[in-house]
Image (cartoon, rainbow, N blue to C red):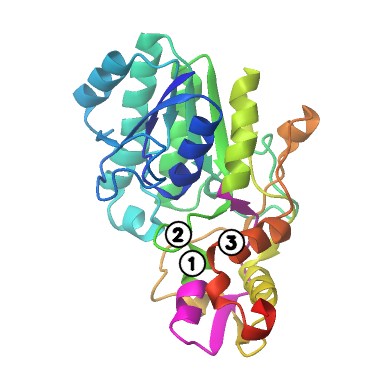
């Protein structure tokens, strides 16, 4: 299958694009960031420039490439930036998605849109499923949810896939929670603070890529959750991380969200825990439990930060 991918230079794209290529798909990768034109190495495509906020450029790209599917990864993922500049958030996450959806519809090709657990308000006691109604509590979640609605309205054959707390990419590409801890350890920190009042479902990018590959080959269109199995707080993730690395020399301190309020001022849902219910019901859920996936990530990408005893 020939696939045009937007936002390919990000963390998820760095796993998805090479997985698709290895499976025999032809991928035309695009992004506005051309700092690293081939982040996956010499075997993958070179990233072409495409700003999805430019309606004409989107139309021209899809017309020129003539893909059999469009994979829309491009997004503004910063909650703080989205809240500080709502126009930017809605332009990047909602209006740009409309441009991509309309161009895909005109070309008569399916569209895959990557969304987020952040569309929920976090008040549910149990894990969110695809049958729960979103109710975003910040601009990021709201702009992504509006994108979902546009895709479902404008493109008949579509996948809308919600990911959880993304993990992956390795040093230099991963800028999320796990990477922040690893950066602190690399800098010699002997104390790590992690919040105990925010809960979610880590989503390992390579596992997501494998599950995604199976899904797009199925032709079973619709809305999906695609996160690793299990749940936990940020503290739980940090605790498992230190255990895997054998870092008994580091003290983990549990705090509430107010501890990071100055740095992370945006409202975040208490819970972003998701269950891949539709994948489960269709017998298509191949996502591993998050502790297993996180251990693999740490041991392959951050082996240099393991304790000397663990390495030996």
Identify the disc placed on residue 257.
none
Identify the disc placed on residue 179.
1
Q: CA distance from mark 2 to mark 3?
A: 14 Å
Which image quarter: residue 297? bottom right
Residue at (71, 61) in percent of width and height: 291
Q: Is residue 220 left or right of residue 17?
A: right
Q: Nearer the viewer, residue 96 or 28?
A: 28
Question: Label 1: how many residues lie within 10 Å, few (<14), some (14-19) or many (20+)?
Answer: some
Question: Label 2: how many residues lie within 10 Å, few (<14), some (14-19) or many (20+)?
Answer: some
Do we see residue 57 in this rendering?
yes
Q: Position of residue 213 (x, y in %)?
A: 60, 31
Q: Is residue 32 left or right of residue 43?
A: left
In the displayed structure, 69 sits above or below 279; it is above
| SS for dot 1 | helix
Q: Position of residue 257 (x, y in %)?
A: 53, 74
Do we see residue 221 in this rendering?
no
Q: Is residue 277 left or right of residue 120?
A: right
Answer whether residue 151 is magenta in the image. Answer: no
Q: Nearer the viewer, residue 174 or 257?
A: 174
Give the magenta range: 181-205
């Amino acid at each position: 299958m020939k696939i045009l991918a937007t936002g390919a230079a990000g963390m998820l794209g760095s796993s998805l694009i090479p997985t698709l290529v290895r499976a025999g798909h032809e991928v035309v990768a695009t992004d506005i960031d051309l700092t690293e034109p081939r982040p996956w190495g010499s075997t993958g495509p070179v990233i072409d420039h495409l700003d999805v906020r430019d309606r004409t450029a989107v139309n021209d790209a899809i017309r020129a490439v003539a893909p059999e599917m469009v994979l829309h990864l491009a997004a503004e993922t910063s909650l703080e930036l989205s809240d500080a500049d709502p126009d930017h958030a809605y332009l990047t996450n909602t209006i740009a998605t409309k441009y991509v959806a309309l161009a895909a519809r005109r070309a008569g090709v399916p569209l895959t849109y990557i969304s987020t657990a952040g569309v929920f308000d976090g008040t549910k006691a149990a894990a969110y499923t695809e049958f729960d109604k979103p109710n975003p509590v910040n601009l990021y979640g709201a702009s992504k949810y509006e994108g979902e609605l546009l895709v479902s309205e404008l493109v008949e054959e579509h996948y809308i896939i919600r990911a959880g707390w993304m993990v992956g990419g390795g040093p230099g590409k991963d800028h999320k929670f796990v990477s922040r801890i690893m950066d602190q350890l690399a800098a010699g920190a002997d104390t790590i603070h992690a919040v105990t009042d925010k809960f979610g479902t880590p989503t390992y990018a390579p596992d997501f890529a494998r599950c995604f590959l199976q899904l797009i080959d199925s032709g079973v269109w619709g809305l999906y959750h695609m996160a690793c199995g299990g749940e936990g707080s940020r503290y739980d993730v940090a605790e498992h991380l230190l255990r895997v690395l054998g870092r008994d020399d580091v003290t983990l301190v549990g705090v509430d969200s107010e501890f990071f309020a100055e740095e992370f001022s945006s409202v975040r849902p208490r819970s972003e825990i998701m269950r891949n219910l539709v994948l489960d019901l269709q017998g298509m859920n191949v996502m591993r439990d998050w502790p297993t996936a996180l251990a693999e990530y740490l041991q392959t990408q951050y082996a240099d930060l393991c304790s000397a005893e663990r390495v030996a």
